[in-house]
Amino acid sequence: MRIRPFQPGDSDAVVALWRDCDLTRSWNDPHRDIARKLAQQPDGFLVGELPDGTVRASAMFGYDGHRGWVNYLAVGPELQRQGHARALMHAGEAWLLAQGCPKLNLQVRRSNLAAVAFYDRLGYGEDDVVSLGKRLIPDAPPAG
């Protein structure tokens, strides 16, 4: 798998990949997430492309001047456990280092034990923090 920067024509394939990997949620519009990333550090949005040109992996890396972040790390289920996610993480870490980023943070749903184990194998540890969030711009209409 070849890792390269995201290109605008990759959008539909990336959204389909995220759905295949159960990363989408009703309250997040994946197309809006892509548009937002393309407006901020688009070179930190990486995809993994098969020899036939099919996009089957992705990761969004960003750096805010204090910490780096990764979101939407995904590898097609049929290609998992072959080193592709590890390669994407290494590419993203290299990109972050080139930005001068001292630390990479990420969030994983507590129920996603396979992802927690994956990051543990890469040397990531649980920080003693509480993750809080507040939606500033709703992507989906309110339920009801």
Image (spheres, rainbow, N blue to C red):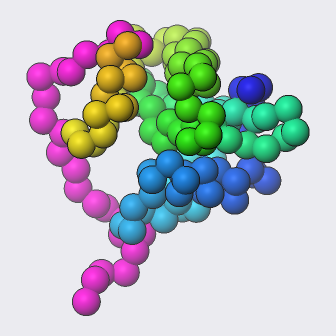
Percent x, y for residue 39? 60, 48
Q: Which residues are magenta?
A: 122-144
Q: Residue placed farthest to the bottom in the image? A: 144
Q: Quadrant of residue 115?
A: top left
- At horizontal 35% and vertical 32% (from top left) the residue drawn is 114
Determine if the magenta segment contains residue 138: yes
Would you say 71 lies left or right of 141 here?
right
Between 70 and 63, the one lying in front of the other is 70
User: Residue lying farthest front?
Assistant: 78
Query: What main secondary structure does the magenta stretch of the protein show?
Result: loop
Rendered image quadrant of residue 5 = top right
Quarter placement of the C terminus: bottom left
When the figure is inspected, residue 93 is found, relative to residue 71, above or below; the finding is: above
Residue at image location 22% in from the left, 50% down from the top:
133
**Residue at the (24%, 42%) spot, across then down:** 111
Which quadrant of the figure has residue 107? top left
Tell me, yes or no, whether the highlighted magenta stretch contains residue 69.
no
Among all residues in the image, which is located at the extreme right?
52
Q: In this rendering, does residue 36 appear at all?
A: no
